Image (cartoon, rainbow, N blue to C red):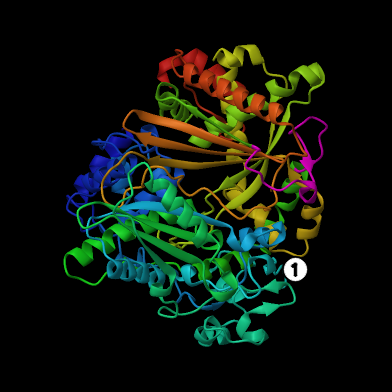
Amino acid sequence: MTDLDRATTTLAGGGADGGTGVPDPAGTLCALIADVLGLAAVDPGQSFTGLGGDSIQAIQVVSRARPAGLLVTTREVLRSETVAALAAGARAVGRSGAGTGPARPARRFGPFAPTPIMAWLGELGGPVDTYNQSLVLRTPAGFGAEDAVRVVQALLDTHDILRLRVPGGAGAIRGGAVGAGADTAGTGSAGADTAGADTAGAAGEDAGEAGAGAAGAGATGSDSTGSDSTGARPLVPPPGSVDARALIEHVEAGTVSDEELPGLVTERIRAARRLLAPAEGIVLRAVRVDRGPARQGRLALVVHHLAVDGVSWRILQDDLRSCWEALAAGRAPEPAPVPTPFAHWAGLLRADATSGRRMAEAVRWTDTLRPAPEPLGGVCAADRLDAESAANRHTLTLPPEVTGPLLTVAPGLVNGTVNDVLLTGLALAVLAWRRPDTGDGDGGSVLVDIEGHGREEITDGVDLSRTVGWFTTMYPVRFDLGLPDLADARAGGPTVGAVLRQVKETLRAIPDHGIGHGLLRHGNSRTGPGLAALGIPEIGFNYLGRFPMGDTADWAAAPGHDFALDDADEGLPMAHAVEVNAAAHEGPDGLTLSATWTWAGNAYPADRVRALADEWFAMLRALARHTALPGAAGLTPSDVSLTGLSQADLDAFESQLGDLL
């Protein structure tokens, strides 16, 4: 019986709604997935990943399924073989506790332990108080000043982290690390007991919750500010404590042309960035651009990175759309509730950092960060890198005829993800880039610091699909590839497929998508200093996901602006010697992949980085060509339940049994 057959049988046995109370769960999920992926329609027999969906888009599906009455997890969206199978396993929101958030009342307000990525920023140095992301949206004709105040106020009151206050500013945050065993509640087995974990993460903070309003209003004193010996403790005051009216600039632009508009908006975004003040509880600024009653305007949101990430922007964009629909219908704007507050999540991370399962990972991360002589194969000292510079930036774009098969077909060859494909190309590119210098003596190792979305399912009863905040994880991955045939790889031959399988398996072996590295590095005093002393990978990689472009509808992303790219005042230190930020854009002409390379001027010369960027795109083109080869698809050991099978065993089975597998 196929996966689709099983799903159909289950749905039939449980009634048309599959026991969810939703008349057609499969049809509902098909419509949601089509909307998220920008497709005209989706068939119940198709899979989310087979359609090119990634983990960030899976979170969007989870978030949009909730208002429709369906509870699914990100993992289920990514792993279900068909949409029908996903629907068969969906639960009703609120039924038998499903989808109601943490088992005990989740803490929302008061001081909380800094998350690992917050502590990372505090250590980075430089002008981190203006470190932000921004989003510019098309606003409906007639979207007035009072409308802007009401929708922004709704965002502020719904999403706690947008009211964030950091005594001393973003640069004062430190990890607040605790030694293993210090937090005994909820960390004995897997650090996943929600009651104990929250107690550990919020120890001594309950009193601060009652006084959060006073703290947010500027009260002083060590308890109310949330400061301690390890640095600033961020805090969240209650809803209503931050006034949207004071955070919005209104700009009249009735005579500004379409060509001039992006420049005007960018100028006002830069001015808004300079007004961010985490120490004063100002982590959001907005700019409303009015072009008259008959033309679409613009709304720019500028949010400190401590309070937002790529997934958060998708949540906020959906909320703005729903808030406007409510206003247009004469109702008060009320975004859907947030099941798991950010402060509760921070407490869970604090407890997990000293759990047995995380402590057991320390040896893995230490070995991963071992030195290596080859360029981009080892580590470097972060404090020796130059600051970011616009002069050290290079952007390339792959056309639709390459990007389409690369991002939608190639992952399916190995039951993998877009990250598997992009990192395969990057690892091969690094080997090819340095091979003229290293020759046959090259150890074949490439070390990459990978950014992940960080919304991992590390415990039951936590739903982060509507939680706004900075969840990013950063973790090192070492790809030991040996000496692959680089000429065959460039040609799209079998070598590139073999390396794709190897890269996929390396990534699958990492527990919880690497969340443990940040926890041990920034949240555990026993392991943190040792990991810090090892240094950082020379190269950092971040795939931001897919973004629709060219849509002219209200609340669509406006043309002429980057989507959710980091920005700050001049002087922000480079976090790696070389960094790659890639994003896919869905436009009227198809899917494209853009990659922006930045580098520290004292680490590598511009011509070497540009050569590496070209080599990466050459390998990605090879991967796209590889998708057309007969027999390119195949299993890897993580796809099968039998233990002890190697890739060689699976390859032998496939060559003997062929299509029977």
Residue 558 x %, y %: 36, 46
Q: Is residue 417 visible?
A: no
Q: Nearer the viewer, residue 390 or 502?
A: 390
Please state which amino acid type lies under the numbered disc 1: Gly
Residue 551 x %, y %: 30, 41
Lateral position of residue 342 relative to residue 337, left or right: right
Q: Nearer the viewer, residue 257 or 24?
A: 257
Main secondary structure found in the magenta portion: loop
Q: Nearer the viewer, residue 48 or 609?
A: 609
Residue placed at 71% from the left, 67% from the top? 177
For the N terminus, which image quadrant?
top left
Question: Where does the magenta region start and end?
Answer: 369-392
For the C terminus, which image quadrant?
top left
Q: Is residue 267 above or below residue 627?
A: below
Lateral position of residue 84 relative to residue 582, left or right: left
Lateral position of residue 243 relative to residue 290, left or right: right
Lateral position of residue 140 relative to residue 246, left or right: left
Asked whether residue 660 is drawn in magenta, I would say no
Residue placed at 78% from the left, 39% from the top? 602
Residue 222 x %, y %: 67, 85
Residue placed at 55% from the left, 68% from the top? 193
Badge 1: residue crowd in 10 Å (few <14, some 14–19, many ≥20) = some
Q: Quadrant of residue 254?
A: bottom left
- Residue corresponding to mark 1: 179
Q: Is residue 553 above or below residue 410?
A: below
Residue placed at 48% from the left, 49% from the top? 564
Asked whether residue 372 is drawn in magenta, I would say yes
Q: Nearer the viewer, residue 88 or 255?
A: 255
